[in-house]
Image (cartoon, helix red, strand yellow):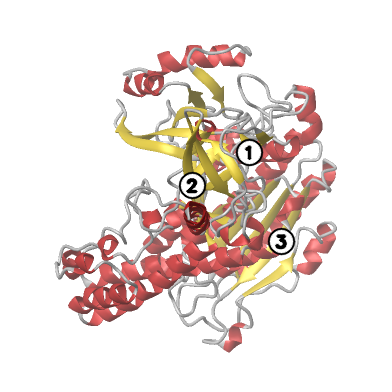
Amino acid sequence: MNLRIAGAALLLCVSAGLQAADKPLLQQGKKTLFQRVLTTPNCQLGADPGGSGEIQPAFSRFYVYERAQAGNAEWLRVGPDSYGKTIGWLPAACTVDWKMQLTLAFTNPANRDRLLFFKERKALEDIIDAPDPVSHIAPLRARLKQGQTAPGVLAQEPEFFVDLQKQFYLLPVLSGEEVMSEEGFRMRLLNVASVSKAEGLDAPGGSAAPGGNTPSNISSQLKEFSAAVVFVIDSTISMDPYIERTREAINKVYEQVAREKLGNQVKFGLVAFRSNTQAVPGLEYVSKMYADPNTVQDRADFMAKVADLRQARVSSSSFDEDAYSGVMHAIDQVDWSQFGARYVVLISDAGAIDGDNQLSGTGLNAEQVRIEASNPGVAIYTLHLKTAAGLKNHGRAEAQYQALSTYPGTNTSLYYPVNAGDVDAFGRKVDALASAITSQVKAAYMGEEAIGSALNARAEPAAASSEEQKMLDDAALIGHAMQLAYLGQKTGTQAPPVFQAWISDRDLIKQNLPTTDVRVLLTKSQLSDLSDVLKQILDAANQGLISPSEMFERLRSVAATMGADPNQLKQSDSTRLAELGMLGEYLEDLPYQSEVLNLDEDTWKSWDGLAQERFIRTLSTKLRHYQRYNADVDRWVALARDSDARDNVYPVPLEMMP
């Protein structure tokens, strides 16, 4: 009898264990978020609690299915995904809880100092609170430059840019807090973790250049540095003079390229754009590739390919043209991987058709197109022709193109207006820009350390106006950023070999410049759920344009069908969207202010029609961007070996969250 009872108890215990293993443990206070941990170096995965086992790669992500005590220590039963598969036990002491599935991406360090990783939070706080942070930072950087350790500093950011789009790395955020610096900037103190392979890493700097980043090594790497410049030009009525002047500028630069034997280093391309052909069939095309820089052989070949380019014979249905379709044509259809420096030069006398307009060929707005351009590392210049005909359009177009042409991480806008659409002034800008890019490639090819040293080699400095000089200075900065990205890729630069440290999300001296961008790592199901919910909110918002009170009534009904807590659906005008229980818990603790989550009924009713329409437009463009993420098979990442593909994640920029 006792044996039967014991056997039944054992069976019950095993059954309960299997049932518990069906799903990971939930985070405290959460209903849908599972417990996750990251492994530290030398963490061993064993078959049983308390036993030794196989060392796991640092920063492997595991889901926690069970917690147990063995030998006065806590152990975790873990699996690579959230779908019931467990593979062994880890000592809790060699793991770190990862509550928010966030990671950081370094911005390009071309316009700022390299990010420092501090051992203690207080050391970082003392610098931020100091009236003169330079006096604290300078001695630390001096020691690091000499290859010595600096007090309190664990590592520094690599010298060259590590592009998350090309080499995914995990720099997870463990915790963070927003503070106000002595200089009046809002900054985040972030507790982060970072591990990368140690081979070829310079201590304490953490720059991963095999064999060391000596000048001779850098010069040899830059021998293969090349540039592609794709002009994206408005080819609607009134554009013929600018089309012709662009051809002339490229022709002149090709002469320079030939003289300096840079034919393999500098390539040009051209895309033309108009507007929606369903609205006006006579426009012939929305966008068209006339010359792909990968296939253009030389000057004669380029000129032959663009010889037929002429302005349209009919007018578009609106003054704005589909500039974003032209830019995205260049981004998507050119193989940018063949080039180190990557430029799009947009030329238009009109504003761009926004993504929510039925005439739009992309469904994207300026911010989304800029993000898409950052994936292959393309800088977008805009030469905006402020002609008299577009006077009422200038302000709106300038705002669009300022946003479109801001180069990530540098706070540099590559937007340049051409007042009154002056063809001569336009020509000088095109000449200067094309020549500057060519000179930068020459400087790199010749092994010159200062990328801007040859910038004005072909022009008298006094001849450049202040506007043109700014354009040349900006070109030098962006060219330097392109080199850092290129060298980072060529040398296999990795994130620093640090485990846990404190950083600032802004440069400690130039506090207006970000050092990192935040990425939210969403699974397929999370992205799908987010898209579905945004569609519901969008439908309700469109209904709310007719009847403002209708929006939240409809959302409460939707929330109820989704199984939301009835207590959350109280009929209160102050209830925020976040409190309706429709959006995932993973959004609740993100370190940002969300217009969508914070929206309540009182605020919605207080907005005028224009504010409500702006909210709807923003939501619409983000929704269309999620569709692009879902289809972007190259950038879905597995965070654990042998994990279910459904737990692969996509690094969504924080600004693209609702």
Looking at the image, the residue that sits furthest to the front is 1
Q: Residue at x 61, y 28 (%)?
A: 497
Residue 503 location (% of width, % of height): 45, 30
Quadrant including the C terminus: bottom left
Q: Which residue is mark 2?
A: 66
Mark in front: 1 vs 3: 1
**265 or 528, which lies in front?**
528
Residue 429 location (% of width, % of height): 58, 50
Kindly identify which numbered label has been placed on residue 334. Answer: 3
Does 100 sit left or right of 294 as displayed?
left
Q: Residues within 10 Å of mark 3 (few under 14, many from 20)?
A: many
Can residue 106 be seen in the rendering of this structure? no
Kindly identify which numbered label has been placed on residue 241. Answer: none
Q: Could you tell me the amino acid type at mark 1?
A: Gly
Kind of element beneath mark 2: strand
Q: Residues within 10 Å of mark 1 (few under 14, many from 20)?
A: some
Q: Is residue 554 above or below residue 405?
A: below
Q: Earlier in the sequence, mark 3 or mark 2?
A: 2
